[in-house]
Image (cartoon, rainbow, N blue to C red):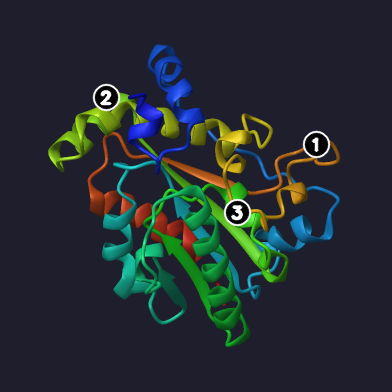
Amino acid sequence: MRNRDRFPGVPGELFELSEAANKEEYRVPDFISRRLSHWDFFIAASQGLRDASVRMFFLVTGASGVGKTSVRKLIGAEIAGKVAICELGTLGITPEWSLRWRHQAVEQVVQLAIKHQESGKHFLLCGDPVPPGELYAAPSAVELAGVQVCLLDASPERQTERLTLRGDPAELIPHHIAFAEWMRHHVVDHRYRPEVIINQGWEQMRWHVWNSDQITVVPWNSHIIDTNELKPIEVARQVVSWIKLHIRD
């Protein structure tokens, strides 16, 4: 049986990426400059650096083993007054762990965020490997007032160590590493292998808002945190500082 048949919840393209990712030299991008497209949605989603009154949707993402859930638990009490916090598993729907399910779950999260936005609260999605491309393509995402993205990253060696310690199946670890490598590219280059999240996905996703010839620059702002040498509490402090940068109201 092929690996892709054994693990239906893992995007098929990642099985092709696994070997290539293991051969590439690991590098965390130093930074990503703020880029805006000419589309009104992208302009609105990037307002946070100019208008602190915008209700922001904060996406803290990354592959398995980088510390997303730990961060969510550590920062919850500190930001709870101004920021509503969510993880896909807390939506009350039965997880299927497929791309189609995740896309539908992201749309539900976006609708929830819009409700909080209307009530004057910011919103944080933290704990799931949701790429910014999926958030932007959600059918209701156009109604979000602002979006900021933070990628938690780790080297293949450190990611393997963490996944092994928590008991993840050894046969899946190469695919988690491959996804981390893909995410590393995706947050700084929206044109890098979009099929990884598009193929076999939900048909109602609006991929054209960023995956088209008209979009020549990366539409989302991305802040990258290298977690290799950081304790969970140190990563959490950096995430809180990043969030507070955009909610100075």
Left or right, 220 with reference to 210: left
Q: Amino acid at mark 2?
A: Glu
Label 1 to label 2, Cα distance in Å? 34 Å
Specify the farthest residue to the front: 1
Q: Earlier in the sequence, mark 3 or mark 1?
A: 3
- The disc placed on residue 216 is 1
> Mark 3 = which residue?
202
Screen quadrant of the C terminus: bottom right
Q: Amino acid at mark 3?
A: Trp
Name the secondary structure under disc 3: loop
Counting labels gives 3
Q: Quadrant of residue 157?
A: top left
Instruction: Give the residue number, with chain letter if any, for mark 2.
Output: 157
**Which of the marked residues, 3 or 2, is nearer the chain's N terminus?**
2
Q: How far apart are the two marked residues, 3 and 2, measured between alpha carbons?
A: 33 Å
Q: The N terminus is located in which quarter? A: top left
